[in-house]
Image (cartoon, grey):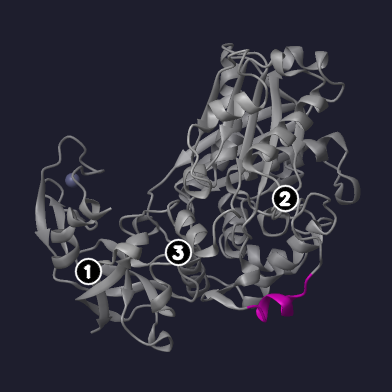
């Protein structure tokens, strides 16, 4: 198996792009990534595209070919594959690209993610996102996606120590980071009162506990490590790629407020990279809701169950803390175009390792990404490091 | 959309799940393959008593279009006395809901299927 490196990254602005279409978004992200790697389209051997639900959001399927076509690669007949694992589609697309390169089957591969969510109304997007969980046995009963994470929060707060203010601090911290990220959907700082005074969505979660509905795309260029210097002076090496599954429905989990797939993928990634928690300089976790960041920090093993709320309150997970979490602003403030999020996490860690993260720069040699599909039925963890 | 929900009528109207005769584990929602015994499992239908308790819950304030008329409503994970857990609405006031509360199943309208107006029925729970 060959070692794999990232040699180019590109990300659109995240937000509500009323004037940009699905096609406009991925073309922009792809062009940025190719430009960053200094390559042109005909050098691409294959594309892997993470997308959750273009079928429901823009009534378009067959995304792989569409993207190759509008990236100008139809006459090159470049193979292009859509990858779907709900909100983990992007992370999984990156993993598929890495597997293709590591295997020796392909050399220059683009992993991308894209979602155009604002062409439908809120009710329709709530319904589409509920498809990330069990449509027949959760959605049928009236479960929304925030509702499922709210039930995780209720269970967690009943059994562990976590105050409503500590939970709000996750959003406050991620907004403070987003304020320093030029591509973030929300670039204003908020206070704990902003969160506590926002409207209830699904008790105990309020509007500011939830990641927003976002349009956006991101892309990265993956090549064999041995060829990386042909493309850039600052390649970033993939140290581990791990993926795990769990029950599709939250009610079937061993423990409602523990994501066993996060535990499994996190452990496997560290083992593959031969690293310990203390070696990780920063982590981008899947904070689709504030409670999800609390669970992620614990289930990845950075602290014991029940401690992440206190660590957040004490500033350990802040940008200048001992374990910076979601320096990009996370899904909460940077935005969550579901299929693009996993690729954006890779872009953020690569920028941090290269030292190109501007006002949100953290001294980083090794970073981790954690991308979750549904309420934890798919988890993808990657570890990236300087060369 | 219609056949997809009609297919599940016995399970949804009467809380019919399955049971593995090999290991005795109960399944609701029903499974036709036992994750513990795998090919060694023998799956038969099982009529649940419909009694259980609330494991966790929330109050849904923002719903999808199909459920918007019903907000706010209490949604819970209910653990049946036979062991399995399922997601269902609790027919009670939001402030009544609590973890550990005993509930029993009732047959109720769940949602209308948008414009076509097909009404879906199924299981909800009430405080026991
Ligand atoms: Zn069995």
Say if mark 2 contacts mark 1, CB within 8 Å.
no
Q: Quadrant of residue A38?
A: top right
Image spot of residue B85 (x, y percent) = 29, 63
Q: Nearer the viewer, residue A104 or B37?
A: A104
Q: Nearer the viewer, residue A386 or A334?
A: A334
SS for tag 2?
loop
Tell me the distance, in whole angstroms, between the alpha carbons under discs 2 and 1.
40 Å
In the image, the segment drawn in magenta is A190-198
A359 magenta-colored: no
The chain carrying label 3 is: A
* Cβ of mark 2 under 8 A from ligand 1: no
Q: Is residue A47 left or right of residue B49?
A: right
Image spot of residue A120 (x, y percent) = 54, 56
* Residue on which disc 2 sits: A14
Q: Dividing the image into 4 quarters, which one contains the C terminus of chain A? A: top right
State whether residue A301 is above or below residue A382.
below
* Residue on which disc 3 sits: A144
Tell me the distance, in whole angstroms, between the alpha carbons under discs 1 and 3.
18 Å
* Residue on which disc 1 sits: B121
């Amino acid at each position: 198996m060959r070692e794999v490196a990232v040699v180019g990254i590109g990300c659109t602005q995240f937000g509500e792009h009323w004037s940009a279409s699905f096609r406009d978004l991925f073309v922009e992200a792809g062009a940025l990534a190719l430009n960053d790697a200094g390559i042109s389209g005909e050098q691409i051997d294959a594309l892997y595209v993470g997308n959750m639900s273009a079928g429901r959001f823009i009534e378009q399927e067959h995304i792989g070919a569409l993207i190759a076509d509008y990236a100008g690669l139809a006459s090159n007949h470049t193979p292009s594959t859509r990858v779907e694992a709900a909100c983990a589609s992007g992370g999984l697309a990156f993993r598929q690209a890495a597997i293709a390169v590591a295997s020796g089957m392909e050399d220059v591969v683009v992993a991308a993610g894209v979602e155009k969510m604002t062409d439908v109304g809120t009710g329709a997007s709530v319904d589409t996102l509920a498809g990330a969980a069990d449509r027949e046995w959760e959605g049928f009963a009236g479960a929304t996606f925030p509702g499922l994470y709210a039930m995780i929060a209720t269970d967690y707060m009943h059994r562990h120590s976590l105050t409503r203010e500590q939970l709000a601090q996750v959003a406050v911290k991620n907004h403070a980071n987003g304020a320093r990220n030029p591509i973030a959907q929300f670039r204003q700082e908020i206070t704990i009162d902003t969160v506590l005074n926002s409207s209830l969505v699904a008790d105990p979660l309020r509007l500011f506990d939830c990641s927003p509905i976002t349009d956006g795309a991101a892309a990265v260029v993956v090549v064999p490590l041995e060829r990386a210097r042909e493309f850039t002076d600052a390649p970033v090496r993939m140290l581990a790629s791990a993926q795990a599954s769990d029950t599709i429905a939250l009610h079937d989990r061993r423990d409602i407020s523990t994501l066993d797939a996060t535990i499994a993928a996190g452990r496997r990634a560290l083992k593959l990279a031969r690293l310990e928690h203390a070696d990780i300089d920063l982590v981008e976790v899947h904070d689709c809701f504030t409670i999800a960041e609390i669970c992620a920090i614990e289930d990845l093993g950075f602290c014991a169950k029940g401690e992440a709320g206190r660590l957040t309150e004490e500033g350990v997970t802040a940008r200048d803390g001992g374990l910076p979490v979601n320096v990009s602003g996370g899904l909460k403030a940077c935005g969550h175009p579901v299929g693009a999020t996993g690729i954006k996490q890779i872009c953020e860690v690569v920028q941090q390792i290269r030292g190109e993260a501007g006002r949100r720069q953290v001294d980083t040699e090794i970073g981790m990404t954690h991308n979750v599909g549904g309420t934890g039925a798919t988890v993808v963890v990657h570890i990236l490091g300087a060369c | 959309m219609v056949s997809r929900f009609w297919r599940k009528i016995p399970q949804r109207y009467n809380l019919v799940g399955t049971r593995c005769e090999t290991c005795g584990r109960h399944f609701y929602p029903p499974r036709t393959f036992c994750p513990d015994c795998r090919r060694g499992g023998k799956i038969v239908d099982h009529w649940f008593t419909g009694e259980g308790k609330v494991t966790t819950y929330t109050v849904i304030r923002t719903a999808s279009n199909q459920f918007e008329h019903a907000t706010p409503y209490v949604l819970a994970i209910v653990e049946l006395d036979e062991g399995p857990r399922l997601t269902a609405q609790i027919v009670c006031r939001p402030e009544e809901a609590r973890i550990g509360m005993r509930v029993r199943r009732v047959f109720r309208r769940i949602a209308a299927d948008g414009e076509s107006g097909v009404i879906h029925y199924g299981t909800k729970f009430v405080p026991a």
